[in-house]
Amino acid sequence: MHVIIHLHVFMNILHLISSKKEESPKIQKLKESCKDTATCPVSFPKDELRERLTPIQYKVTQEKGTERAFSGEYNKHNEEGSYRCVVCGNRIFTSEDKYNSQCGWPAFSNVLSQEAVTLADDTSHGMRRVEVTCSRCGAHLGHLFTDGPAPTGLRYCINSAALAFTKKTDDANKLMTKKIKSEL
């Protein structure tokens, strides 16, 4: 009985310490520059998403779930190209900013543009974190931490299940096709 009481007291103290932790100025600045989550221009019916996405993709992007560490398709992925939101196709990260943080999930030191993501406070599971969502459709992608490499010092810790990868040659082909169509 005493062990349970001590454990409960310890967990409350731990929660107080983590919730009092000040947010870094870098994260505060990023939050100010990112879009508001209430203004997602694209939405999809939940039934359509359940049919189109795998169960883990749905759980991660729509229910703010997390895939098991070291289990994701893109954790040790090293091809050149871009990473897009699996729900709406919004281009968010490039392979140039991907690095091996050894955290168990794909990690990126930067986003393609601040407009691609929305940042919000996440106090779930007794922790204080910064949630990263797609600014186009609101899909949960992962979390942002300030323990990344220079020069940004950021680590976008992202679920593989929230991403779709496009090879660099595929990106170049799409841009060329778009340019040709616009000239016609």
Image (cartoon, rainbow, N blue to C red):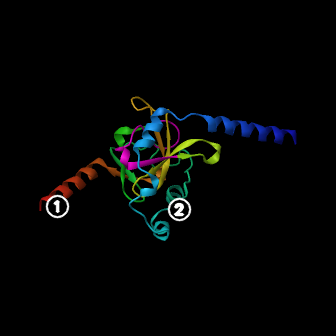
Q: Inspect this view and state whether residue 107 appears.
A: no
Q: How far across and down, in percent of the image, does residue 163 sit?
A: 43, 52
Q: How far across and down, in percent of the image, does residue 98 sit?
A: 40, 39
Q: How far across and down, in percent of the image, does residue 135 sit?
A: 41, 53
Q: Is residue 123 above or below residue 24?
A: below
Q: Name the residue nearer the viewer: 58 or 31.
A: 31
Query: Mark 1 = which residue?
Result: 181
Q: Tell me what residue is drawn at x 72 percent, y 36 percent.
A: 13
Q: Looking at the image, is mark 2 or mark 1 earlier in the sequence?
A: 2
- Figure disc tally: 2
**Crowdedness near tag 2: few (<14), some (14–19) or many (≥20) residues, C-alpha within 10 Å:** few
Which disc number belongs to residue 55? 2
User: Which corner quadrant holds the N terminus?
Assistant: top right
Residue 113 included in the magenta stretch of the image: yes
Which residue type carries mark 2?
Answer: Pro
User: Which corner quadrant holds the C terminus?
Assistant: bottom left
Q: Which residues are magenta?
A: 101-120
